[in-house]
Amino acid sequence: MRDPLDEVRAQDVPVDVLRRAVAQDRLAGAYLFEGPSGVGKERTAIALAKTVLGPAAAGRIDHGTHPDVRIFRPRDDGHRNIKVEKLREEILPYADFAPFEANRAFLIFPEAEVSFPQHHAESANALLKTLEEPKPGVTFLLLSERPDRLLPTIRSRCQRLRFGRLPPEVLAEILAEREVPEELRDAAIALADGRADVALRHCEEGAAERLLELALRIDDAVGGNRPGALVLAAEELARHDDPVLALDALGLFYRDVAVSAAGLPDDHLRFRHRAEIIRRRAARLSPGAASERVALIQRTLMDLEANAQRQMAMDALLHRMRAT
């Protein structure tokens, strides 16, 4: 049977570390898989369990019925952190008695920084006590996009493995395997920033292409001479279902304009499937001005994160962009 870890794409360093640990029978009691969403952290955790427990266990692991592999996700309600009662009554007793059938058990925690955030320290401290006194034959796998939100003491008790973003060609393979229409893939890959889950979401009903068209409309309004168009464009941005995503797409568009204005070839573009229109927009904007617009967008994103009033932030952004 093929090694399940072979199914993990473009994460050679963490996979090699885990392979060596398995081969030497030196798995750590706790690992912290760090990296963006959609890059294979959970896939790797499950593949590691399959590799260790063997081919006969793979089917039950996939169906969630193997007694020695448990996945504990954040709650669906409230702040989503795992309550200390659940940890003490269900999770930690499981860890105390496992493994049940094999010679090793795996406890997998996707979004660990959500389940055990620093600001809900009771559960985090209860988990920490278990990590400080690891039981032989039990491995905790904490998966996190924002490990800085975990207690430093939890991070220090784990072997940390960094997962990088997926290259465009891997995202293209994943979208093709999911039978995503070819005409929807390029924009989705450009906006996904190396994350397969984001690429797939951007393919739904052509969402990525709509975001690019919005960026082009904003650029028309900013570069035009009609103040009313600028007001309408700011209102469209402010009303968008996901203004952060819309600003991310706008920033990526101006990044491409800066690249093209600087004279770099089209293969440096993220929206390279729309290279012709990017070149036309770049002909009327200097690399410095396009880069300044990217910086203004980043500042606006920070303002929104700090709870700035959305409409005022968008109005200010577009007027500042026009001045560049």
Image: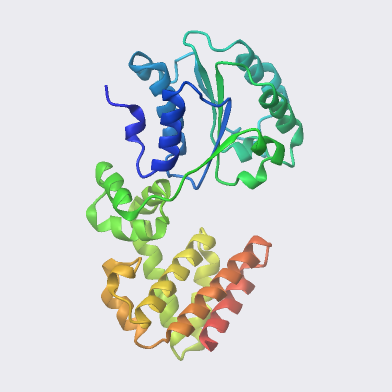
Q: Looking at the image, which residue sits at the far right?
A: 122
Q: Determine whether, in the image, residue 155 is placed left or right of residue 220.
A: right
Tell me which residue sits at (41%, 24%) in the image.
Answer: 23
> Is residue 66 placed above or below 19 in the rendered structure?
above
Tell me which residue sits at (45%, 31%) in the image.
Answer: 18
| Quadrant of res 296 | bottom right
Q: Looking at the image, which residue sits at the far bottom?
A: 225
Tell me which residue sits at (61%, 15%) in the image.
Answer: 94
| Quadrant of res 99 | top right
| Quadrant of res 128 | top right
Residue 155, given in percent of the width and then of the height, sits at 65, 38
Tell me which residue sits at (45%, 70%) in the image.
Answer: 250
> Is residue 30 placed above or below 220 in the rendered structure?
above
Q: Determine whether, in the image, residue 127 is placed left or right of residue 181.
A: right
Q: Nearer the viewer, residue 243 or 197?
A: 197
Q: Nearer the viewer, residue 240 or 40?
A: 40
Q: Looking at the image, which residue sits at the far front?
A: 24
> Is residue 1 placed above or below 78 in the rendered structure?
above
Residue 123, given in percent of the width and then of the height, sits at 72, 30
Count the numbered circles shown.
0
Residue 52, given in percent of the width and then of the height, sits at 42, 20
Residue 202, given in percent of the width and then of the height, sits at 38, 54
Q: Determine whether, in the image, residue 252 is placed left or right of residue 29.
A: left
Q: Determine whether, in the image, residue 229 is placed left or right of residue 135.
A: left
Q: Quadrant of the N terminus?
A: top left
